[in-house]
Image (cartoon, grey):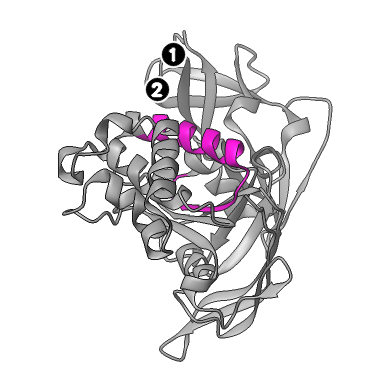
Amino acid sequence: MENTSLTLEQVNKWYSGDVHAVKGVSMDVRPGEFIVFVGPSGCGKSTTLRMIAGLERVDSGTIHMGEMLMNSVPPKNRDIAMVFQNYALYPTMKVFDNIAFPLKMRHWKKEDIRHRVTEIADSLDLLEYLWRRPIALSGGQRQRVALARAMVRAPKLFLMDEPLSNLDAKLRVQMRREITALQRKLGTTTIYVTHDQTEAMTMGDRIAIFKDGVVQQMDTPQMLYQKPANLFVAGFIGSPPMNIWKEGEKFCGIRPEHIHITENPDHIRARVVSVEWTGRETVVFADTENLGNLGIVTDAVCPLKVGDRCYLALDKQFIHFFDGETGGGSNNRHKKTL
């Protein structure tokens, strides 16, 4: 399988003349990289994916796969495979024929089709389901069939548009592990769209965070979490999100795990308003006089109850400062606590 790079340069998309859905998106995707587009509904992530696929026209800017300009190339000639959230399987065809369909359209020999479909089905644990119809499969099994159909012809680029959104929580966790393992095994350049930050953080080599048609930041999961470029990224990535408050002309932020509950009356006075036990940790929300409501991640065993008074210490080396007008961020590194 030949891997390919993907380059977007100042890509724009308008609807109805004045709706600017995608605004000057530029990025370089390396061969074999797993890139996740994430953001709230209507942020432009799926529209950008559809322009890469050729399903939406690029109004200005360029898209290259490798050295080839793709703007005017029909979808069928782009050597890509898409996986949709609704699976898009043919209900009257058995699983074998669904997977084999792209090969039949390319006039492969029957014996080659049988060998290739069997190989792919085996890698996805689908061999025992090859002669069933999609209606007889579970949601996870249907998604595996959709993945197999995308993989079977070894495309240069995988495009996945919220493929796990119709699955229950437990199955989503299982399927995201399977997808990332398969992508690493195949080495195929992949663009994956989701609104779920957990999917984004656990699956992507790099993540592009969209808001209002603009890529706010594109980086590794670790860098997005540790060094958010602006207030939106800081508040979007992380659960619970970063605590934000205004101090003079700037906004300040700190992650919940960098606030510590103490018994020192010289620290910040607070009153507990919520306690959420998750099993491995406890998330406490507490009201303060000057910093507003703060989220704190602490040990699984936490004696605090709603209404309790406590004291909080902020680890200053992990405080972020954001510009009061632009929201742009920078890190502050100190050695003391507040």
From which residue to which does the magenta span run?
A: 172-196
At horizontal 83% and vertical 32% (from top left) the residue drawn is 334
- Seen in the picture, residue 62 relative to 91 is either above or below; the reply is below
At horizontal 67% and vertical 58% (from top left) the residue drawn is 4
Question: Is residue 18 shown in magenta?
Answer: no
Q: Find residue 278 and report its horizontal and vertical position in percent.
A: 40, 20
Circle 2 residue: 275
Q: Can you say which quadrant of the picture contains the C terminus? A: top right
Characterize the magenta stretch by its predominant secondary structure: helix
Is 11 on the left-hand or right-hand side of 113? Answer: right
Could one spot residue 45 in this view of the protein? yes
At horizontal 68% and vertical 48% (from top left) the residue drawn is 228
Amino acid type, callout 1: Leu
Q: Which mark is residue 100?
A: none
Q: Residue furthest bottom?
A: 17
Circle 1 residue: 304
